Every structure is written in structure tokens, then in C-alpha cells.
Image (tube, rainbow, N blue to C red):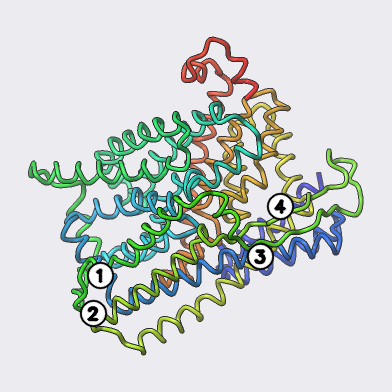
Amino acid sequence: MLLTLLTLIPLVALLICLMVLKLSVPKSGAISLGLAVALAFVFFGFTPLGFAVAIGKALWLALFVALIVWAALLLYHLVSDFGAITVVNASIERVLKDKFVAFVLLAWVFTGMLQGIAGFGVPSVIVAPILIALGFSPLKSVAAALMGHSWAVTFGSMGAAYFVIQNLTGIPPEHLRYPLWIFCTVNIFLAGIGVCWIGFGAKGIVKGLAYVIPVATLMSMVQLMLVSNEMFHLATILTAAAGLVWFFGLYKIREFSGRKSPISEEAAEATEPTEKPKHKLSLVQSTAPYALILVLLLSFQAIPVEIREAVALAPSFPATATSFTDEESSVVPFTVPEARNYSPIRLFVHPVFVLLIASGTACLIYKKAGIWDAGKFRNAAKLTVKKGIPATLALVSLGSMSLIMMDSGMTFRLARAIGDLTGDFFPFISPFLGVLASFLTGNNTNANVLFGALQYNIAQELNVSTAMMAASQTMSAGLGVAIGPTLVLMAALATKQEENVPALLKKLIPLVLIIAAAMGIVNYVLIENPWLMCQIYGCEDCGHYVLY
């Protein structure tokens, strides 16, 4: 019991430092890291080899994410300093004259489309600056982009997180697809409502339902069709594309009928007029770097998988084990298997390459347009370095804390204690565990690696559907990405809001917990009433449902 309580110390310290003491992310991460290291060595039998391996993994993961951070920062400062984002803003205002529509469509649906292609923080890095340029407050813009894209994470990045949880558990796709769709549908609806709340409060929710309900319904139906045909890698992109078309169509129908869009007057009052473009850039020139990102990422999907997998750089790490046994634990000592080709940086998959190509293309466009200024380029590079260094330090400290807790068995003990404590109510608790894993690791894929097998094993012990529990894990982990400190920091840095990370977490954490609770209720009801799932599967015998 004492050891279980000790595992909470680094997490509680991190939250206190960020939200109460309002320390910076690097400082908060460093304090939590120090506590995790001390606890791991003194109470959990952590070894020097285990420490070295955990730090090595953390440094590599920090490099993996930092490359995206630096490249995204460079692109942002280039398009911002040369005025391209101002042109994009003006064009959006011409097409979507109602700012409520623009806010919800961009933050909720367009971010999902970007997540489907790129992921790794790209949606919030791209969309939040556009929302700010439209006149919305930076805090609302970043929070909305983070919340809005959360529904798209599991099937995003061409289904990366889905394939992790499926391969990890071995659950057949035909049994996993419907539970995944159910939880994703819950998140689609509630993420849309959450964006309305972030932007416009309670009135935004009430009047925003005129868009959220029909758009979310269509998106859910499209995704059902895709997962039914096991097209998991397209389950986010095509779902979001359908949502964009239908959302814009609804807006045009309302506009043509002469009806005012929801809270259009309040939205206009809540924002400031957008600055007029300062340069002679066309919309095509201004959006070309972003369009190129989409084209390249989609084009790379045509490359055979074996080639994409082969062109990669990744280290390998040996297996480790704690130095003493713990009679209270079911695993004695706690072991970590060998990690071969750990988190590979793939040429045709990692976003850094397309972001750098986009930045180079932007420079060429600005030269051709006659607005090139070497001073502005140097300023963009300088700002990138200035913000990239503290971001990288934060990634190292948070990643190191997470890996040390994972490899020392601290996170496993905490998760197992939650399962033992909750018993039959674990299906309700399951989504909160997924959120916690994502908060610790920073992304859905690593969260599934951390707790995916654990949730599967607990489901077996409770003799309940492993498919439901696995789906709960990965979908709630996708939701938890919205409050992952590393992703929040990336979005904050890209919009010059690094000082507002605590405020962002305060705004997002309650919403994430509410959605996780809704997922928990759905999970509990379906676990307790397996015949409901059998109606979806179209079977007469629920035996396979309990097994999977």
C-alpha cells in the first residue's frame, strides 16, 4: 500500500508545480523527475542499467518530438513574419463570415483532418495560429485546437495508435472495430460541444448544437462504414473530410435562407477586427506550404510499407529488471523487455521532413513574390531557437520522468492498484487510466504501449470483454493527448503562449475528465449488458463478446 501511494508523488508534484505554483514546464518537469528518480532507486529497486536505459529512451523520444517542435516553430514564424497567415485569415473571413462557424469548423473538424494525415501535434500548431489571426483570444484558440482534434487521435496518423493496440492485444479487427467506433462517436460529439464551450460558453453549447448534432451524426456514420470495412488508416481522414463538407454545406444553407448563424453577434463582439494583408501574396501562395504538407503526407502513403519501414533511424535498448523482489507485486522482480528499433524516425512518416520541405517552399514563394527579407528569415530562425531550447528541456524532463516511472514498475503498480481497488467498477475507471497514460507519455501510441496490455489482462481477470477494454484504453488515451504536457507545450510555443500552460491545463482538464466519465459510463453499461453489443455484432451468442 505504501509503495502504491509513493507512485503518486511525482504526478501530484507535477500538477502542483504547474497549476498551483505556476512554475514553467521545464522546472515542473525537473522537480518531478528528481522525485521519480529518488523513489525509483530507494523503494523500487531501480538499477543503474535501468536508469541508463530509461534516460536513453527519454532522450530519443525527446529528439523524436523536438524535431517536430523546431520545424513547426520555424514554419509558423516564417508564415507569420512574411504576412501569409494574415492573407489566410482574410480569406477565411470572406468565405466564413460568421466567426462562430469558423471557430468550431476549424478547431473541431479541420484539426481532425490534419490529425488523420500528420498528427504529432501538427493540428494544434497549424490551426491555433489561424484562430488567433481571426481575432480569437490565444488561450481559447490553443485550448479549442487541442480539445477539438482529440476525437481523431486513435485513427490519426494513418491509424498508428490503432495498430499498436490491435497488435499488442491480438484482438481480431472484426471484434475491435465496433467498440472503437462507439467510443469514438462519444468523443466526436463531446469534443464538438467542448469546442463550443471553450469559445463561447454555455450559450455556445446551446446554439452550437444546430451544427454539432448533424455534423457529428454524419461523421459517426461515415466512420462506421470505414471501420466495418476495416479501413482503419482512413477512418479519421475521410470522416473529417465528410464533416468539413457537411458543416460548410449547413452554413451555406443557413446563409442562403437568410437565417443568422448561432451567436454570430456575440462572436463578432468577442473578437477584434483582423489586420489587412501587408503583402501582395495570393491565397494560393499563402496556403501553398500547408497544402504541400497534405499532398506529401498523402503521397507517402502510396509508398510500399516495406520501403517506408526500411528507411528509418532507431536505437535498440536491452532488457532490464529491478534489483529486488516485491512480495506484494504479481511481477517479481519488475522486468522490461528488450526494445528493438525503438520509436523509429522514418523518412516518409515523421512530420519533420514535410515541415522542413514546407518551410523551404515558403521561402521560395516569398522570393518569387518579391517580399523576401533576409532579416525576417533570421528573426524567424532566432525565435525558433529561443523557443525550441526550453521546449526541448521540457520534453527531456517530462519524458525522463515518464520512462523512469514506467521502467521501474511505478506506473504498473499504480494501474494495478486502481484495478484491484475498483473491481467490477473498473470498466468505468478504465478511460481515466487511458487519460493518465497519455498524460504521462504524451501520445496515444506510447500510452497504449504503457497500459494496453494491462487493461487487456485486467479484463481477462474480471472475465469481461477485452475488446471493450482495449477500445476504452486507446480512445481515452487519444482524448488524454489534449492535456499531455508535451503537446500542450508545443501548441503554446507555436502561439507564443508558453506562459499560459497552467491556464490551458485548467481549462482543458475538467472537459477531458467529463468526456472520460461519459466513456466510462458507456463502457460500464455495455460490459454489464453484453447483449447490447451482440445486437451490434448481429450474433445470437454473446460468448465471443465476453472472450474478446
**Cα gap from disc 4 to disc 1, whole angstroms:** 51 Å
Instruction: Classify residue 495 as left or right of residue 399.
Output: left
Tell which tag, 2 or 4, sits nearer the viewer. Answer: 2
Disc 3 is placed on an element classified as helix
Q: Which of marks 2 and 3 is nearer the N terminus?
A: 3
**Looking at this rendering, what residue extends furthest in the top direction?**
540
Above/below status of 76 relative to 175: below
- Specify the amino acid type for callout 1: Gln
Q: What residue does disc 1 label?
A: 285
- Specify the amino acid type for callout 3: Trp
Q: Quadrant of residue 171?
A: top right
Q: How crowded is mark 2: few (under 14 residues within 10 Å), some or many (20 or more)?
A: some
Disc 4 is placed on an element classified as helix
Q: Which of marks 1 and 3 is nearer the N terminus?
A: 3
What label does residue 60 carry, if any?
A: 3
What label does residue 8 carry, if any?
A: 4
